[in-house]
Structures are given as structure tokens and as C-alpha cells.
Amino acid sequence: MVVGNTTNRTKARREVAVWDLPTRLFHWSLVLLVTVAVVSAKTDRMTIHMLAGEAILALLLFRLVWGLIGSQTARFSHFVKGPRAVLAYACGMLRARRGGTEPEPVVGHNPMGGLMVLALLGALTLQAVAGLFTSDDILVDGPLVALASGSVVAGFSTLHRILADGILILIGVHVLAVLAYLVVKRDNLIRPMVTGRKAIPADAPVDSPKRRPATLALAVLAAAAGLVAAVVQAG
């Protein structure tokens, strides 16, 4: 009997804080609102669709600011890496997989996940802005259609329709990646986004990330919502 081979499976673990409450609430609120936006568009409930889009835009503005001044793991500087870092992380995962060892734990988004975050935030932001200038030329106009020329409205309307499918593809890739981590790597990425905490090896040299106060997040969200409301009213 070889006892040493069971070391990785029985290794002691500890929990560290990963995601602050504002980031978790943003994530699940965005999931809900995107679902509402997609379903309402498919069922021609355009009033609900536009309200959902405006709420999504406010959330995205909050997240962009929170990515600059928020808690450590929420900041873009923490998880947005260059091509070399992404490649090094991917190679490290492959080596760990082949060697039957556990890769170094990452608190927050890993370099590959960071690319997906940027893609989703960028696509959703562009989609929400395009929606403000979108018209179906029959009954429904975005709140800023009257302020733009016909060619601008036509361009944004086309972009809004095409990008909708692209966003669904990105969401599908994101969900598949999360499931792959769960099944292949036994790394549950969903639980930390619910509880805010992640289990890592007890001897891993990882500290809990620094957090910013929730009151600051609330102030940023209020400012973002106020800005979106002002822009909509201006139309």
C-alpha cells in the first residue's frame, strides 16, 4: 500500500475571503437582469426590456468604477493580465494536470477568467449603450433616438441586434468554463460567488484580499443610477 499518493486528496484546507458583497450582488443582479432583458425581447415586452437595459447600464457603470477603486479582487489591476501571463497560467494548469498535483490557488479571477470578464463587460456595455439609440422603425425607440441622426440610429440598431447573439455565445462559453472547472479541476467557482469565501490548501501562501467599505459601493451605485436616469431623461 502506497500511502504517499493520497497526500493531495487529504491535504488540509482553509477558507479565505474572495469576493466582497458588492461584487457578488453585482454578479447575480446582472445575471437576473440579462435574463429579464433576453426574455422580454423574445416576448415583445419592450417596456420591460428597456427598463432592464437601463438597469444593466447602471450596474455596468458601477462595476467599471468598482474595478478601479473597489476591493482588491474586484479591481481590474488584480486580474487583467497580458498574453504572457495568460499563457503561463494555461501551461501551469496543464503541468499540474499531467503531474497529478494541485495548481497554485488563485484568489479571485485567474488570468484566463479575466479575459472573459473583460469580454462580457465590454460586450454588455456596448449593447446597453447601443440600446439607447436603437429603433425598430415602427413602435419602439430607445430614449436617445431623437438626439441622433438617422444613420447613427440605423448603425446602433444593427449593432444591437447582432451583438445580442454574440453576448449569448459569450455567456454560453462562460457557463461551460465554470462547469469544466467544477468537473475537471474539482474547483467550484460558483460557491465563492455566493458565500464570498473559497477553500484553498492550508499551507498556501495566500492572504485574504483587502476590501473597501460597502458604503462606498452603495455611493458609486447611486451615482451610476443617477447618471443613467439623467441621460434617459435628457432624451
Image (cartoon, rainbow, N blue to C red):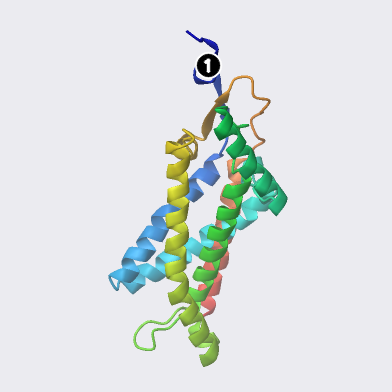
Q: Is residue 146 visible?
A: yes
Give how far across and how far down residue 143 sits, in percent.
47, 78
Is 76 placed left or right of 123 in the picture? right
Q: Residue at x 66, y 48 (%)?
A: 87
Outermost residue on the bottom side: it is: 150
Is 147 placed left or right of 104 in the picture? left
Give how far across and how far down residue 208 sits, in percent.
64, 30
Give how far across and how far down residue 96 sits, in percent.
59, 32
Q: Is residue 156 above or below residue 52?
A: below
Q: Which residue is mark 1?
A: 5
Outermost residue on the front side: it is: 1
Q: Is residue 146 above or below residue 159?
A: below
Number of disc labels: 1
Under circle 1, the secondary element is helix
Q: Is residue 106 visible?
A: no
Camera-side residue of 158 and 234? 158
Camera-side residue of 211 and 113? 113
Q: Residue at x 66, y 41 (%)?
A: 72
Which amino acid is tagged 1?
Asn
Give how far across and how far down residue 199 sits, in percent.
53, 27
